Image: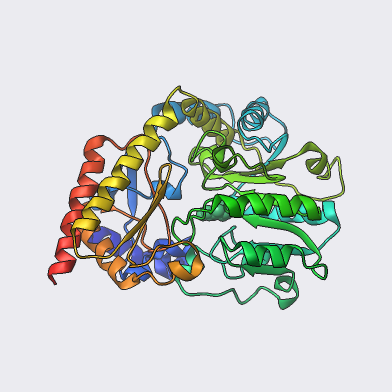
Amino acid sequence: METRQSKAMFAEAEKVIPGGVNSPVRACRSVGCTPLFIERADGASLYDVDGNRYLDFVCSWGPMILGHAHPEVVAAIGAAAAAGTSFGAPTPAEITLAEMVVEAVPSVEKVRFVNSGTEATMSAARLARGYTGRSMVVKFDGCYHGHADSFLVKAGSGLLTLGIPGSPGVPEDIVKNTLSIPYNDIDSLEKTLTDERLDIACVIVEPVAGNMGCVLPDPAFLQRLRTLSTERGIVLIFDEVITGFRLAYGGAQHHFGITPDLTCLGKIIGGGLPVGAYGGRAEIMDQIAPDGPVYQAGTLSGNPLAMAAGIATLKQLQRPGFYEELNDKAATCAQRLREIAAAGDIPVQINSIGSLMTMFFSTDPVTDFASAMKADTTRYAEHYCNMLGQGIYLAPSQFEVAFISAAHSANDLEKLQKMTEWSFKKMADR
Ligand code: PMP
């Protein structure tokens, strides 16, 4: 595929934007490419500035569960924009979206809208610390909760892709209050949460990990996490920025039947516009200013365009059978890919749940950070380039998930399967 315009734009971008991108993974370094510059998208297709079309399995890293430029969402944004883009004052749309979130997500009695997932998790941790009067945050290796200082300890996503364990610029004094322990490890969970010397305010977890690739939780691990947190008065935070309105309308907590104290949301609830949210039990949420002493604010929070896009998106998700249809076609696709892998010579592990999936180039099952790290990233890079050349747009890193949207047709998924088979054969023949 000819990508001359993208290459020229990247060279231009690098002069004025660090790394040429506004979020590190987009630079495609770990797969040895330069990024495509996107001109437009609709449904399951992306079009780059050279006029190439790609079948998109990144879906803006999760928000585009309906596919791109869904007519109802675009119309809602247009109508909202025509009525003014920001007022810094309450609007009716904020109540509507808040009511929809409260109704959908089991743990949420009250919700505060912010502008990104990072803001949601950062604010939830502050709230948990304010509410409990304790200081320690416990997280899990390979989980990513945005780029706030407290969470940049053994984090996933771009830090994993780039091999960065933490980040310069984050003071020791801050990260000494963060403890990162292995995902899915009940023993270590037990030891940590019952340690009297630790002043634990909250535990934050991706109920399905999505930022070391897709790693499923052992349901017993989530259950133990809930029980121990309750016993110890620790605030349990589910980071559902990816899984919220994705695994089910009520998120992973509905799927697993485990209710956290606080929930962080983002991505889908903004329908592709910048948004985040955190919510939970009213008793905890009432600690936030102006009702309580824990401060958190935002000039553009509850932005009318983002609220309109979120409401329009959620209305589509309420259609009867939406999740059954989406999850069924994703499960069929994952199963077919497993068969293709089993018939070929390339060892892969396919982790999938709902419309989330990661194909790990590994001989061993992937259940945590250590096993994810065994994946062959060189092979992933080769596969990525093979697929991109055939018009299949995957995440430019082994440690991310592929997202299936309602806009992917049976034909689109068949193309993904055929090209995967072809790519595996090409790699095996080499
Ligand atoms: N939490 C999770 C689980 C995420 O996947 C992400 C981003 N991918 C974030 C938080 C941060 O969200 P944002 O990029 O909107 O700040």
Compared with 205, 259 (above or below) is: above
Q: Quadrant of ligand 1?
A: bottom right
Q: Residue at x 52, y 33 (%)?
A: 309
Percent across and percent down for residue 129 are 80, 57
Q: Residue at x 40, y 63 (%)?
A: 365
Q: Residue furthest left?
A: 429
Percent across and percent down for residue 79 are 51, 25
Q: Residue at x 67, y 54 (%)?
A: 225
Number of residue marks: 0
Residue 32, picture quadrant: bottom left
Percent across and percent down for residue 421 are 18, 55
The colouring scheme, among rainbow, by chain, secondary structure or one colour, is: rainbow
Percent across and percent down for residue 408 are 31, 38
Q: Residue furthest top?
A: 320
The C terminus, quarter of image:
bottom left
Residue 100, picture quadrant: top right
345 lies left or right of 14 = left
420 lies left or right of 219 = left
Compared with 371, 342 (above or below) is: above
Is residue 54 among what the camera can see? Answer: no
Q: Nearer the viewer, residue 388 or 200?
A: 200
The N terminus, quarter of image:
bottom left
Is residue 172 among what the camera can see? Answer: yes
159 lies left or right of 195 = left
Compared with 172, 61 (above or below) is: above
Q: Nearer the viewer, residue 41 or 176?
A: 176
Q: Residue at x 44, y 55 (%)?
A: 214
